[in-house]
Amino acid sequence: MSNFDPNRFVLEHDQDTPKEILRAAYQAFGELTVSFSGAEDVVLIDLALKVAPKEAVQVFALDTGRLHPETYAFIERVREHYAIEIDVRSPDADAVQAMVREKGLFSFYRDGHQECCGIRKVAPLRKRLTGLPVWVTGQRRDQSPGTRSSLQIAEHDTAFGSEASPLYKINPLTHWSSEDVWTYIRMFDVPYNPLHERGFVSIGCEPCTRPILPHQHEREGRWWWEDQGGKECGLHSTNLGR
Ligand code: SF4
């Protein structure tokens, strides 16, 4: 939908609830493709299925090959709970093998996470998003003070779209806090990843995620050996330019 205006959408829907934002996005595009990370953004799936017919809701997840066993089990549980297909995407095997052969299985601890995330997450995501008009993410402003504080409910995704095939990103949870998400999960009995019961808040790959202590920011549980300010894996790289 090339005439979608994200600024206008923000003006008209910024004060709406996530459900209303998703409904408006569905009305604008006629489809919703939800990016599901295996963490608490399962709320998006729950909401999307309330505002759009099942056949109009596509759900995908990126299997980096390094997720916790609990996350794989959780993705399967969500698939069964909602009786939906989840398009689980794998990275390019040759690219992973070449990186691991040259640098080992834990190069991100030495070189930073960008190369590994680039191969295991960003490239498969780019492939999945090619040709799509819109995708829905679970990003929230409170997730990362360094990179998400000026997040908008609708954005032109210049990182994965192109001039010939513009892509827009809908972030219905922009104004929600972690507490809001968990209130919703409890209120509507939404399935959640059992790792949350063990102190994990922001959940990514097993070697790059750890539980946090009370009063630590959730992003401190991700790539903790790196600078605190710029923690993005590349899925939302436009955040780094804000
Ligand atoms: S989060 Fe860690 S293991 Fe996962 S893709 Fe990024 S660097 Fe690799």
Image (cartoon, helix red, strand yellow):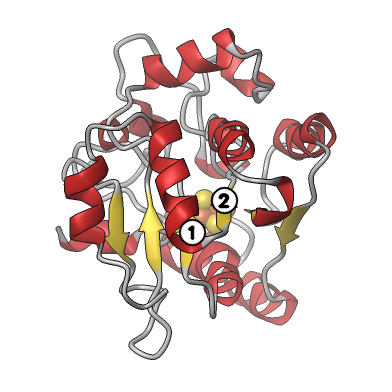
For the C terminus, the quadrant is bottom left
Side of 96 relative to 51 (left or right): right
Q: Which residue extends farthest bottom? A: 164
Gap in angstroms between the C-alphas marked 2 and 1? 6 Å
> Disc 2 on helix, strand or loop?
strand
Task: Report which residue position mark 2 lands on.
Answer: 34
Name the residue rendered at 74%, 30% in the picture.
70
Q: State whether residue 223 appears in this view.
A: no
How many residues crowd mark 2 within 10 Å: few (<14), some (14–19), many (20+)?
Answer: many
> Disc 1 on helix, strand or loop?
strand
From the viewer's side, name the closer residue of 80 and 203.
80
Q: Mark 1 and mark 2 in contact (Cβ < 8 Å)? A: yes
- Relative to residue 160, is residue 110 depicted above or below? above
| Quadrant of res 30 | bottom right
Name the residue rendered at 58%, 44% in the picture.
37
Side of 64 relative to 26 (left or right): right
Q: Is mark 2 within 8 Å of ligand 1?
A: no
Q: Where residue 222 sits in the image (x, y, percent)? A: 42, 38
Q: Where residue 121 sits in the image (x, y, percent)? A: 55, 62
Task: Report which residue position mark 1 lands on.
Answer: 135
Q: Amino acid at mark 1?
A: Trp
From the viewer's side, name the closer residue of 60 and 210.
60
Side of 242 relative to 181 (left or right): left
